[in-house]
Image (spheres, helix red, strand yellow):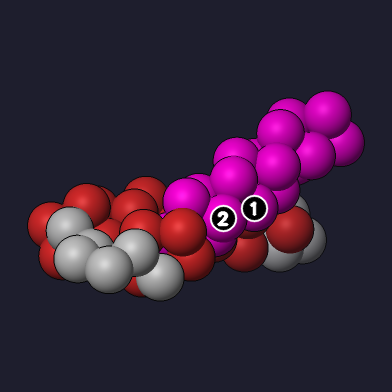
Amino acid sequence: MNNSHMSALRLKHAELEAKLEREENRPLPDTGLIHALKKQKLHLKDMLTQESLPA
């Protein structure tokens, strides 16, 4: 996988982390949204891990 794609995945992961943090710190956080964001982050992390393994 090329570096620009990896960078895009890392950026998306960071954006999801920021959204997750904002939602968790709201007075009445949406637990469904938190769950969905965590699931998306985990998926991106898995993709990054798989792509960084040697072929």
- Quadrant housing the C terminus: bottom right
Q: Position of residue 25 (x, y in %)?
A: 40, 70
> Answer yes or no: do the residues labelled 2 and 1 have beta carbons within 8 Å?
yes
Q: Looking at the rendering, which quadrant does residue 9 occupy?
A: top right
Tell me if I can see residue 4 in this picture.
yes
Crowd rating for badge 2 (residues with CA inside 10 Å; few <14, some 14–19, many 20+) = few
Mark number, residue 14: 1
What is the three-letter code of the residue carrying label 2? Ala
Q: Please name the residue that numbered disc 2 is placed on.
A: 18
Residue at (71% x, 63% y) in the render: 53
Between 18 and 53, the residue placed more toward the observer is 18
* Label 1, residues with CA under 10 Å away: few <14, some 14-19, many ≥20: few
| Residue 30, position as x, y percentages in the image | 17, 58
The residue sitting at the right extreme is: 3
Q: Amino acid at mark 1?
A: Ala
Residues in magenta, as a range:
1-20
Mark in the foreground, 2 or 1: 2
Q: Magenta span: helix, strand or loop, mainly?
A: helix
Is 39 placed left or right of 21 in the picture?
left
Q: Is residue 42 magenta?
A: no
Residue at 54% x, 59% y: name it: 17
Q: Which mark is residue 40?
A: none
Please, what secondary structure does the residue beneath circle 2 have? helix
